[in-house]
Image (cartoon, rainbow, N blue to C red):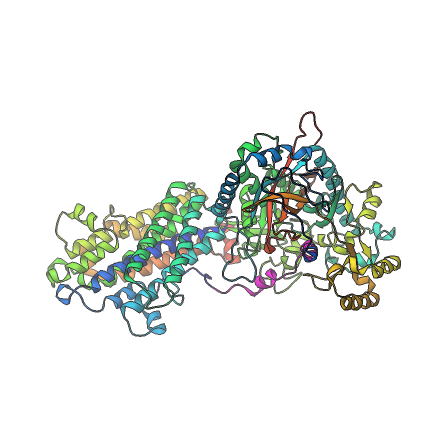
Amino acid sequence: MLSRTADNLYWLSRYMERADFLARIIDAAQRLATLPTAYGGTGSEWESTLNAAGALDGYREHIGAVNETSAIYYLAFDPQNSSSICNCLEFARTNARAVRTALTIEMWQSINTAWLEMKRFQTIFGKPGTIDRLELSRFLDFVRKASLDFDGSAHRTMLRNDAHWFSRLGLYMERADTTARILDVKYNVLLPATEQVGGSLDYFQWTAILRAVSALTAYNWVYKSSIKPWFVADLLILRPEMPRSLRSCYDDIVRLLDNIGRAYGKQGKAQAMARETLHKLENGDMKDVFGMGLHEFLTQFIEGNDGLGAAIGAQYLVHDDEALFQGQMQSQG
Amino acid sequence: MPLLGQPGIGLPVLASILVYSRRKRTATDQLWMALGLLGFSTKSFSVSGVRSVANGRFFDEMTKPDGLPRAVYERVNDWLASAPPELLASRRSQAELMFRRIGITFAVYGDKDSTERLIPFDIIPRVLGRSEWTRLEAGLKQRVKVLNMFLADIYGKGEVIKAGIIPQDIVYQNEHFRPEMRGVKVPHDVYVHISGIDIVRVDDHDFYVLEDNARTPSGVSYMLENREVMMRLVPELFSRHRVAPVENYPDALLTSLRSVAPKASGSDPVCVLLTPGIYNSAYYEHSFLADKLGVELVEGRDLLVRDKNVYMRTTQGPQRVDVIYRRLDDDFLDPLAFRPDSALGVPGLMSAYLAGNVTLANAVGTGVADDKAVYTYMPEIIKFYLGEEPLLKNVPTWRCREPDSLKYVLAHLPELVVKEVNGSGGYGMLVGPHATQAQIAEFAVKLQNDPDGFIAQPTLNLSTCPASFESGIGPRHVDLRPFVLSGADGVRVIPGGLTRVALKEGSLVVNSSQGGGTKDTWVIDDFEGGQA
């Protein structure tokens, strides 16, 4: 398939997943921001949320002082924020239009419908300060549904070939990245058992994290225990049965890259990198992670994941001419 | 750490895309606009639509002057008479829903807020009888065969010019003439692989060619989608007719494209469809066709040329490309050969083409054949190559470069449409019946100073077909664009085409950006016992 088509499919999924992530962390932050300090409210919820979205620097540059109204506007609607929810949906649709023929009707309709609905919300939330809480929660629900709808139609209707694999690859790459980011923002409350501090003070923060990734119920099933911070980290990093965990994402990433490698009769750097990361996650335990330092672990993971993204790009999505022909010589040789 | 974004996403649209989008209107568009300016008025049918009489000034394709339907339309007429207005209304809104869901839209240039619109669709089919179609088809084949012969000749020996059939300056000084193509042999001498010949009727016998589209004609996706929608929308009307299918068009197109692949490309040539990209007004059609053809839809940046061969960039490395169905104008194909500012093309593409390593469909330089000035010579050109009379008529045209014609035109300015040969977008045009005395006088001077630069045509009484509206059924002016394919195995016409209809009452403008709509076009078997 065309490299550009693969690129469009890959980024289409990434942007849809990213929109979903942003909707979830806004929702979580709203909950936390209403907590009294005695229950763990810190007053810096929006700062850490902007940070998790990788948007804090941009926010400070464009907006300045952090407050709830401006933070929500910046994360959800601001055209200046290249990763605002609206930009994500806009870019997702731009990618989708460019590969109409590689999408199923259902996928196209899910994106197109979402985009039209987003345009409607944009007219309601034209500028900061016009955001009504009820309407906002409708908007966030809509974004999560749109992402589910797209995900479901991709899963149910796409032919299982390289188009599908690149599309899913984008999804899991993005999901791994955002899960790590959610954890990283809260790493200070996810301390190992031996260093237990805070106790119930952080309870609501932990549940907020779980809620943000739709894992609150899953936690109860897996651990059958009250919420413990190291279990939260374990669930989202190492647990293979947890669909957003780093481990689970890399199970899928490795599988998809293997499918592509097999179909093309050729493996490359991307496959090797992904396998190496998966190997670490399979064989690691939380003691190692906390021993290394959770923040250090997550930072390294995010960088490694970005590195894998670059390798996938270079191997399949965007070639310079020399690399394109060199690749071919190798495969013929 | 910021979230990583897709390289290049969200950047401003490339300047050259904007340039491309602002290119001039086609000659047909101009003509429609000119005719539209005349503002003919027609009387509306009454709601029942059966016994009312069409205005005698125009040939109505359904209703004869005596109020009875023509034979081919009998069953459509019965259906309209028996269908309650609510039924038609509900079908109309269903149609709109279907089109919106499928996403058949077109972009309107210069309209930032609504980049995608729906072309209005009229649910009453336009009907042609088999015997009418057979005549039209023969004429189309003859015409396209000659367009190909003409192009092979003017880029070859130039016999048609040597024989004095057409003045050489009209050909060689033409802005669409490509000197690069001189002496180049294209596979099977086919230049115009895909053409759309715009046809109008003024009576129940003659078909007039309004314009030959020999570059990158569009509209075929509407022909195909209109039929799909109609089959779901009015099954009861289909069941009363035997309608020639159009759905095999993509198959026929692919066969034609593969038949003209370079010899070296082997038994399974790789075809692609080259689009200017998602900002082009016909992008929907490009992606639709690529999908139906089962070929890759590529943009210029997906292709590259190395050692005079064309490759596409794929996830598995470079892949050789043999045939390019390009929906990109000559000017933009290759920045090294033509417009250097084109970011839509492929650097070096012409070198690969001239080396015979890739086939472009349509060939480079076909614009000469659908030029306004060349058009006026088509009847003589047909006679020259085939020794036959043209089966389709040209709209009578006075070439002001000829003294007798100039004299006639000057004497009849108030009733003629006078156009600049190289004019575009309706500029430099005189619409006699709408012009003031002063404008006519001014134009007469211009004409005398530069007679070579002008042609003149009478205003045509275009035929009408019934169309369905909230207020009832009324006759509206129509044209027809049948699609003609040429390959190594000859010329093929798909029975039907795109009927464009001027939905505004009395308007002759069928242009989609000017309130024009489309209709499904049926070629039906003649009814038993009656001649269609």
Closest to the observer, B259 or B378: B378
Is B167 placed left or right of A29 in the picture? Answer: right
Q: Is residue B201 magenta?
A: no
Q: Is residue B122 above or below residue A315?
A: above
Let me know if residue A104 appears in the view: no
Q: Position of residue A12 (x, y in %)?
A: 42, 53
Q: Is residue A215 left or right of residue B305?
A: left
Q: Quadrant of the N terminus of chain B?
A: bottom left
| Residue B29 magenta | yes
Q: Quadrant of residue B465?
A: top right
Residue B88 vs residue B144, the one in the foreground: B88
Image coords of residue B472 (percent x, y) = 57, 44
Place residue B264 in its image quadrant: top right
Looking at the image, which residue is at 73% across and 52% down? Answer: B370
Name the quarter where the C terminus of chain B is drawn: top right
Q: Residue furthest top?
A: B529
State left or right for residue B289 relative to residue B448: left
Image location of residue B288, percent across then percent down:
54, 46
Q: Residue at x 31, y 50 (%)?
A: A250
Magenta part, dominant SS? helix
In the image, is residue B426 above or below residue B195?
below
Q: Which residues are magenta?
A: B11-33
Task: Classify B55 as above or below B18.
Answer: above
Q: How many marks?
A: 0
> Which of the 4 image quadrants contains residue B38?
bottom right
Can you give x and y, in whole percent of width and height, for residue A88 in the image?
39, 58
Depth order, front residue of A299/B49: B49
In the rendered structure, the answer to whether residue B326 lies left or right of residue A202 reads right
